[in-house]
Amino acid sequence: QVHLVESGGGLVQAGGSLRLSCAASGRTFSRYVMGWFRQAPGKEREFVAAISRSGGSTYYADSVKGRFTISRDNAKNTVYLQMNTLKPEDTAVYYCAADPGLVVTTNAYRYDYWGQGTQVTVSS
């Protein structure tokens, strides 16, 4: 089992940057595909980014491609989401999630473990 804790959210002006972190418990972090999802008020949870077990492959939603970067440090059991050029429409609760599968997926139902979320608010 994996316990995930996000941090790094906050209030930022449009055009600014934030770096989210997700710390995982346990010694098997490197066996999980990791993903970031977000949910805005009144909207469904949506995929943001995902990274393979080794970190060699990354995937992004079209809405964040070129602005967000996902990375991981398996020695520190941590996955990151660097968010640049933030827009008001990026405002949401951001969740990290862990998938024990072998293939990176954008499907939230494939992810077995979820953090509690961290709020990101982008003002215009």
Image (cartoon, rainbow, N blue to C red):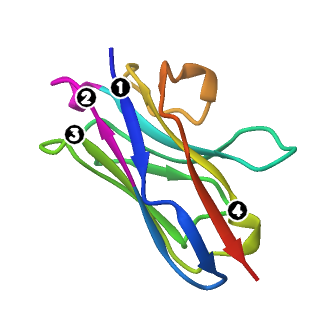
Tag 2: amino acid: Ser
Q: Label 4: how many residues lie within 10 Å, few (<14), some (14-19) or many (20+)?
A: many
Q: Which residues are magenta?
A: 21-31
Would you say the residues marked 3 and 2 are in contact, meaning their CB atoms lie under 8 Å apart? Answer: yes
Residue type, label 4: Thr
Look at mark 2 in the image and give the residue it sits on: 25
Q: Residue furthest left?
A: 75
At label 1, which amino acid type do we have? His
The residue indicated by pointer 1 is 3
Residue 54 horizontal/vertical position (percent): 24, 40
In the picture, the disc for residue 77 is 3
- Callout 2 secondary element: loop
Q: CA distance from mark 2 to mark 1?
A: 5 Å
The residue carrying pointer 2 sits among few (fewer than 14), some (14 to 19) or many (20 or more) residues within 10 Å by Cα, namely: some
First in residue order: circle 3 vs circle 4: 3
Looking at marks 2 and 1 on the same chain, the residue that comes earlier in the sequence is marked by 1
Q: Nearer the viewer, residue 58 or 10?
A: 10
Instruction: Please give the label number shown on residue 51.
Output: none
Within the image, what quadrant is residue 44 found in?
Answer: top right
